[in-house]
Image (tube, rainbow, N blue to C red):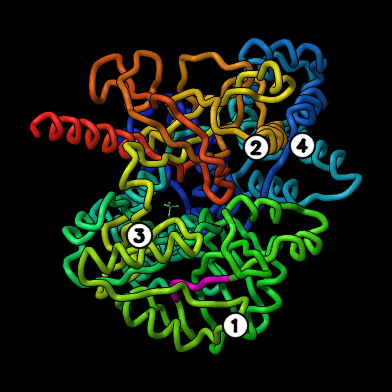
């Protein structure tokens, strides 16, 4: 398939943010796409080569790309840099630059999607000392044969700056229309995506086998399943109102969610955002297979740092020390954990997702042989407020965050947040504010004790409609010296020269970051704001929402992707909830 067709679709899609138009362009593109290339097209549209969980990174630096442009076009590096500085985006600048190409190439080879994809794949796989030269060679050979517009998109994919704003749902709408002629079939596609986390694979199946293929889609061991999420409730009676008068209550542990895929001695671990995190937990890989009495399983657990002497649970922060590439053995000894199972998703070749909660729990208890390291999360059946209250107290005393409440007769809803699972944290009950998970988008340098580090962070909530990060507050309290050091270290890898186009902020920060890191904050109130961009125009024209007196809780949520941060929808719900409380109080 000619790459020009894809480049043309990219160009059209870049010019709009409207979902209907994007869908239409995608449908037109998919209809022109041969079956064998559809998965590649779907990955490239997302600026990727493979699904995220495979961890394939292109990792091409701007400097290298500039050298490659120069090599293929004969244009001096200085000139390219000047042009780049003007537009701030090397991909777009390259269109202008390459129009001025002085070097003519003969024997141009056709640029096909297959060729671009395979070359990018080779680049991603390169390692070792000669890899930079080889990358240069591959990139300039592609640029050599590409038209300026094709070249600009190749560069954007390489640099990770292709931002088409196509959400997964839009992609699935378009796949359903193109290959089943009915948008309503998106639901079935969604299910396959939820159990495979691989949109390329979903596209391949629907393009080659239609709806029938999608209906037969099965869970594959070692392919992560998108996790089920919980809604929150503020009180015991709200829980009873939503769940009836008999349901399960489990301790809500404060650790890292881990999805374990196990077959014999082979163990692969995925995080909540489906990143492969096996290397951080060699102790799980070594010990867990002995505790599991099944041939093949997918289980969910919370890995929690513990005090080895007392067995007490320690806060989530302790696990941060495990996130390292080197000397992991030492960290394993220094920061011991326990693995606390709470669900089973697949058992000996069969999906367990459709089973009711109580059947899954029974199965879990049957196959997990408990010991000091591996346990099932404490669970009890509750029928009234007092029982919830009592179990909540126990959980807090054991060092947990609160409770997870689960309906007994409901299946596991992969990839969705719903009311079949509710979380009840203690702080929700007495303080006004709920905690929010926000993305760090910028920072301001500190003064005094904080000189040389970031004193204040600029945070954003997630606008999942537009796929943007909207500023919501500045936060400068709640940080210990250790937090400031740690944040400075983590964030210095994410600094960008220009504000990322997915960031929506009127406020000018000293430094901008790639919107990646999620931190937890509490606040006293949500207020209307003329400056901040969260939920802009939704409550009142030219006005957004902001957090008043925000405070960092000490939690850096490395396990969350930026897209898992609190959404503007959630912020609005909290805003409206708080207005209702104020209103009710006035009436009393
Ligand atoms: P939150 O991150 O506040 O939305 O809370 C949901 C998270 O709680 C999950 O992603 C798990 O990591 C964690 N968790 C702790 N205990 C449980 C439990 N018993 N059941 C399900 N999730 C749990």
Tag 4 near tag 2, CB within 8 Å: no
Disc number lying in front (4 or 2): 2
Disc number lying in front (3 or 1): 1
Residue drawn 42% across the image and 42% down it:
29
Tag 3 near tag 2, CB within 8 Å: no
Q: Which residue is mark 4?
A: 141
Task: Name the image quarter holding the C terminus.
Answer: top left
Would you say the magenta stretch is mainly helix, strand or loop?
Answer: strand
* Secondary structure type for disc 1: loop
User: Residue 437 location in percent, x, y?
Assistant: 46, 40
Q: Which residue is mark 2?
A: 483
Q: Which residue is mark 3?
A: 189
Q: Residues within 10 Å of mark 4 (few under 14, many from 20)?
A: some
Q: Quadrant of residue 452?
A: top right
Span of residues in magenta: 339-344
| Of callouts 1 and 4, the N-terminal one | 4
Q: Residues within 10 Å of mark 3 (few under 14, many from 20)?
A: many
Residue 246: in sight, yes or no? yes
Indicate the quadrant of ligand 1 in the picture: bottom left
* Secondary structure type for disc 2: helix
User: Residue 518 location in percent, x, y?
Assistant: 53, 40
Residue 319, magenta (yes or no): no
* Secondary structure type for disc 3: helix
């Amino acid at each position: 398939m000619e790459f020009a067709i894809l480049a043309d679709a990219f160009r059209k899609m870049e010019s709009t943010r409207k979902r209907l138009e994007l869908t239409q362009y995608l449908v037109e593109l998919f209809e022109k796409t041969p079956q064998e290339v559809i998965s590649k097209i779907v990955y490239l549209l997302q600026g990727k080569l493979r699904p995220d969980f495979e961890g394939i990174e292109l990792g091409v630096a701007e400097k290298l790309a500039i050298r490659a442009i120069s090599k293929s076009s004969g244009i001096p590096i200085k000139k390219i840099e000047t042009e780049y500085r003007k537009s701030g985006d090397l991909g777009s600048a390259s269109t202008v630059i390459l129009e001025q190409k002085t070097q003519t190439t003969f024997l141009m080879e056709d640029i096909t999607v297959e060729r671009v994809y395979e070359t990018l794949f080779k680049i991603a796989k390169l390692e070792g000392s000669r890899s930079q030269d080889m990358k240069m060679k591959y990139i300039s050979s592609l640029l050599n044969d590409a038209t300026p517009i094709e070249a600009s998109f190749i560069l954007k994919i390489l640099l990770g700056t292709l931002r088409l704003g196509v959400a997964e749902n839009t992609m699935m709408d378009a796949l359903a229309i193109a290959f089943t002629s009915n948008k309503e079939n998106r639901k079935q596609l969604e299910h396959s995506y939820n159990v495979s986390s691989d949109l390329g694979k979903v596209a391949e199946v629907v393009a080659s086998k239609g709806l029938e293929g999608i209906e037969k889609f099965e869970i594959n061991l070692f392919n992560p399943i998108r996790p089920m999420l919980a809604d929150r409730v503020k009180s015991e009676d709200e829980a009873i109102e939503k769940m009836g008068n008999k349901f399960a209550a489990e301790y809500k542990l404060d650790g890292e969610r881990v999805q374990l895929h196990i077959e014999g001695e082979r163990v692969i671990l995925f995080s909540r955002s489906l990143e492969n995190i096996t290397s951080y937990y060699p102790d799980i890989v070594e010990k867990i297979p002995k505790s599991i009495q099944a041939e093949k399983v997918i289980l969910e657990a919370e890995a929690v740092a513990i005090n080895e002497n007392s067995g007490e649970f320690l806060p989530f922060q302790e696990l941060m020390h495990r996130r390292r590439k080197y000397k992991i053995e030492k960290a394993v000894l220094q920061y011991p954990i326990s693995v606390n199972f709470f669900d089973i998703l697949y058992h000996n070749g069969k999906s367990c997702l459709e089973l009711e909660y109580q059947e899954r729990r029974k199965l879990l208890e049957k196959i997990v042989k408990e010991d000091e390291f591996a346990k099932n999360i404490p669970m009890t059946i509750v029928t009234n407020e007092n029982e919830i209250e009592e179990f909540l107290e126990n959980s807090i005393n054991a060092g947990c965050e609160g409770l997870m409440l689960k309906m007994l007769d409901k299946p596991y809803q992969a990839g969705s947040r719903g009311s079949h699972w509710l979380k009840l944290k203690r702080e929700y009950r007495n303080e006004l504010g709920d905690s929010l998970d926000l993305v760090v988008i910028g920072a301001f340098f500190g003064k005094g004790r904080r000189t040389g580090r970031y004193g204040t962070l600029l945070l954003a909530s997630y606008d999942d409609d537009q796929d943007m990060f909207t500023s919501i507050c500045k936060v400068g309290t709640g940080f210990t010296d250790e937090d400031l050091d740690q944040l400075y270290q983590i964030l210095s890898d994410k600094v960008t020269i220009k504000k990322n186009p997915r960031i929506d902020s009127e406020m000018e920060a000293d430094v901008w970051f790639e919107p990646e890191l999620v931190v937890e904050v509490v606040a006293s109130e949500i207020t209307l704001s003329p400056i901040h961009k969260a939920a802009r125009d939704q409550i009142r024209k030219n006005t957004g929402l902001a957090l008043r007196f925000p405070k960092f809780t000490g939690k850096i949520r490395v396990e969350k992707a930026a897209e898992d941060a609190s959404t503007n929808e959630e912020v609005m719900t909290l805003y409206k909830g708080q207005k209702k409380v104020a209103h009710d109080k006035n009436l009393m």
